Amino acid sequence: MNWMGGLSLLLFWIPVIGPLVAGFVGGTKAGSIGRAVAAVFLPALLTGLLAFAGVTYLTDWYVWGVLAGLGGVVFCLLNVVPLLGGAVLGGLAAHLGRR
């Protein structure tokens, strides 16, 4: 997750290639396709959970927290398609490299 997140931040200015490279490197570091896919989706879910908790705490009304949490998840998942493709390719390359 750290490799994918860090490289995504560094390569954000390259529209499709940046997340693809970040996903490939993260998938290679993960070592398998399953762990790579988990590393793609887990940060989006954690961001949504943190947004929910923070906004609910600040507004004292859970409905705003739910809306902020869903918005955070959707915002993070907008970048997931090329990141997921790179992660699957990287996990596959790591798996085949061990053989």
Image (cartoon, rainbow, N blue to C red):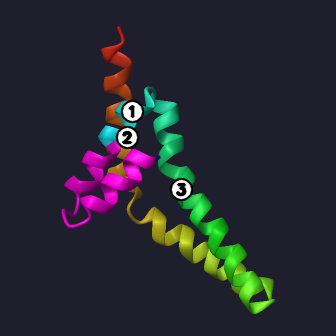
Would you say 37 lies left or right of 91 here?
right
Would you say 94 lies left or right of 67 here?
left
Residue type at numbered disc 2: Gly
Pick the front one: 34 or 30: 30
Residue 74 magenta-drawn? no
Most prominent secondary structure in the magenta stretch? helix
Q: Is mark 2 on a helix, strand or loop?
A: helix
Q: Which residue is drawn at 37% across and 40% down?
A: 26
Q: Quadrant location of residue 23?
A: top left
* 3D distance between C-alphas at marks 2 and 3: 13 Å
Residue type at numbered disc 1: Lys
Q: Residue at x 38, y 36 (%)?
A: 27
Q: Residue at x 72, y 74 (%)?
A: 53
Query: Which quadrant does the C terminus fall into?
Result: top left
What residue is shown with label 1?
Answer: 29
Residue 12 magenta-drawn? yes
Mark 1 or mark 3: whose residue is earlier in sequence: 1
* 3D distance between C-alphas at marks 1 and 3: 16 Å
Disc 1 vs disc 2: Cβ atoms closer than 8 Å? yes
Q: Where is residue 82 in the image (x, y as percent from the top left)?
A: 32, 52
Return the mark for residue 43: 3
Residue type at numbered disc 3: Pro
Q: Where is residue 40 in the image (x, y as percent from the top left)?
A: 47, 48
